[in-house]
Amino acid sequence: MLSKITICKPEELGEADRNRWSSAQSAQPVWNSPFLHPEFARIVARRREDVRVLIAEDHLANRAWFAFHRLKNGLARPVGAPVSDHQGMVSEPGFIEDVTEVLFEAGIGALPFSSWSSPTKEFLTFATHNEDSHILDLSSGPDQYFAEQQQQHHKYFKKMRQRARGVIRDYANAEFRFDIQDQELLERLFQWKHDQHARTHSLDVLHIPWVKALLENAYASTDPGFRAVLFGYKIGGEWAAAELGLLAGGVYHSWIAAYDEKYSRASPGLLLLHGVIEQADKLGIKQIDLGRGHSHYKKYYASSLLPLHAGCLIGTGRAARHRKLVFSLCDGFAKLPLGKLARLPGRLDGSLEYIGACHPARSDQFRAFGGAMARVLKNQT
């Protein structure tokens, strides 16, 4: 039974609450992610005025925390969406209230989510699909980790050793560097990512001011319990790949990675990943989360898989009615005998939801709409 619900800005959260929040994360493995850390919400709030923290307390004084963007008409999104790779409501072990009821009571009528994790099942009735995040267990050290993975995937890791030797043979030297303080390398990483989006004709979120500022502010964070770490890999004395990730509570989450296309045959991104694993102890990393997607290579590194769910929580109110109408139209169109065209409204709705998460201002959403239409139609052909 709920005793109290409080909604405040992240900067209004007291130190005691932040400590309880972090402790609750550590007590439940599915929530031990930098994206669910209270400091992540504070950093997002520096560029987004709509960030709020919901604090729910039951009759036994157990608490739960959920950071979100509070929008109009009961619409909300998890904090940092769409670039938050792990979402959820963190609660203390004794808190047994239904998550959906807590969110409804807080006035949230519609909550699209893309990477939700929960140890309970009630929220998952609103999920439409799930995709696994790839987890690397380094609690016994990098050497033990590699020994276990090589037993399962001997041919793959043999190939990677050959590739590392090939880089030395072809370019004379290679160097992995960790915990780099170099703004120029960060900008180079952003440019490589711009180039990648241009090649794939996908929405480039790094052109969105608040998203880029979020990455830069995380990199500049001096919080001892939460920060962004920059890794780099050099080939022949030149930067070939880089990666920026979040580190909190011994968990490192790979966030943005890219490489110089001219070195693509050498697989610099994978060689950089090997460097991150090998040097994990020096940064206190006990677990690496590689995130969703790209299982064609991540499957060789995963010690375990964490299901992350996507869908939309729907309750009551104007935002909920709007989502119900859209879902009904998309489902009805999908049943028509139109081949690939039957999926067009659903794909378009997905693109518009992504745009809405990226661009808080309605004027920016309209400007981005044309590009979304072009991408959806291009993918249909």
Image: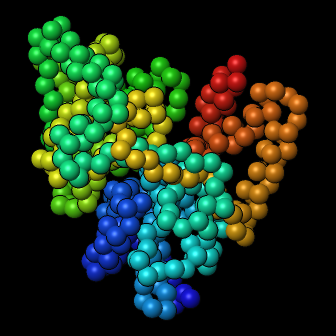
Above or below, 124 against 149 in this view is below
Quadrant of the rendering where the N terminus is positioned:
bottom right
Q: Closest to the observer: 118 or 312?
A: 118
Q: Residue furthest right?
A: 337
Residue at 50% in and 23% down: 200
Looking at the picture, how far across and down is residue 93, in whole percent?
Answer: 41, 77
Looking at the picture, how far across and down is residue 185, in whole percent?
Answer: 21, 31
Q: Can residue 162 be seen?
A: yes
Quadrant of the rendering where the C terminus is positioned:
top right
Looking at the picture, how far across and down is residue 227, in whole percent?
Answer: 24, 53
Q: Closest to the observer: 83 or 289?
A: 289
Above or below, 130 against 63 in this view is above
Q: Quadrant of residue 303?
A: top left
Q: Quadrant of residue 2?
A: bottom right
Residue at 69% in and 43% down: 349
Residue at 32% in and 77% down: 20
Looking at the picture, how far across and down is residue 53, in whole percent?
Answer: 44, 71
Q: Closest to the observer: 193 or 263?
A: 263
Q: Can residue 356 be seen?
A: no
Q: Residue furthest front?
A: 151
Q: Is residue 30 left or right of residue 118?
A: left
Q: Residue furthest top?
A: 170
Above or below, 332 against 92 in this view is above
Colour option used:
rainbow
Residue at 40% in and 47% down: 304
Above or below, 289 against 56 in this view is above
Q: Is residue 26 left or right of residue 180?
A: right
Count the marks: 0
